[in-house]
Amino acid sequence: MPAHKRLRTWIVIADGARARFLVPSEDARRLVAARLADMVAPESRGHARDLKRDRPGRSYASARSGLRHAVEPKHDPHKLEKHRFAASLAEALDDACARGEVDQIVLAAPRRSLGELRGLLSARVRHRIRQEIAKDLTNDTAAALWRRLGPLVKPIL
């Protein structure tokens, strides 16, 4: 009878500005960092004034009134930076799947980040997602994550 291949499972803990890649250790008793380094987008956590280039433009209210008003930007700079980060995370996961580095993924992120990321993931990555957890776990330690996620990971080793 052939031996079962051990599935390579990544646990991806993300939010709008940071992603951690973890794998179960060889003895399946803790989580260790995966080959990828953490992804960080400090711009997403900065002040809006630092993300914009200058003050908003001004325009006249109408041709005859002579009043001028500030023009509000069409998009929130924080949301744009978080979207860019989610797109780069989706690309990194797709690259790892294309190289055959991961068989299954457990993905944990806040609801909004998870929803945005879900729309950006390729079919190749979506087929490898074993479970999604709609919760912000980015500040948890590896030990706390193992206590929380260990039961999810152990059956798929």
Image (cartoon, rainbow, N blue to C red):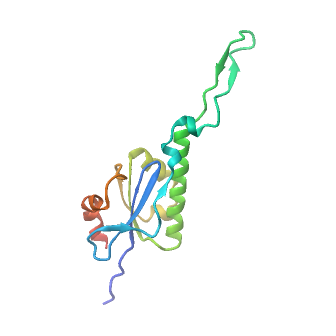
Residue located at (32% from left, 86% from top): 3
- Residue furthest right as drawn: 63
**Residue 59 locus on image (x, y percent):** 70, 21
Front residue of 13 and 41: 41
Up-down relation of residue 119 to residue 100 (above or below) = above
Residue located at (31% from left, 73% from top): 157
Residue located at (39% from left, 73% from top): 8
- Residue furthest bottom as drawn: 1
Up-down relation of residue 120 to residue 53 (above or below) = below
Q: If the image is split into quadrants, where does the N terminus sit?
A: bottom left
Front residue of 54 and 119: 54
Left or right: where does residue 67 sit relative to residue 18?
A: right
**Residue 129 locus on image (x, y percent):** 41, 62
Dividing the picture into quarters, in which one does residue 130 lie? bottom left
Dividing the picture into quarters, in which one does residue 77 lie? top right
Residue located at (52% from left, 40% from top): 78
**Residue 9 locus on image (x, y percent):** 38, 69
* Callout count: 0
Left or right: where does residue 149 sit relative to residue 128?
A: left
- Residue furthest top as drawn: 65
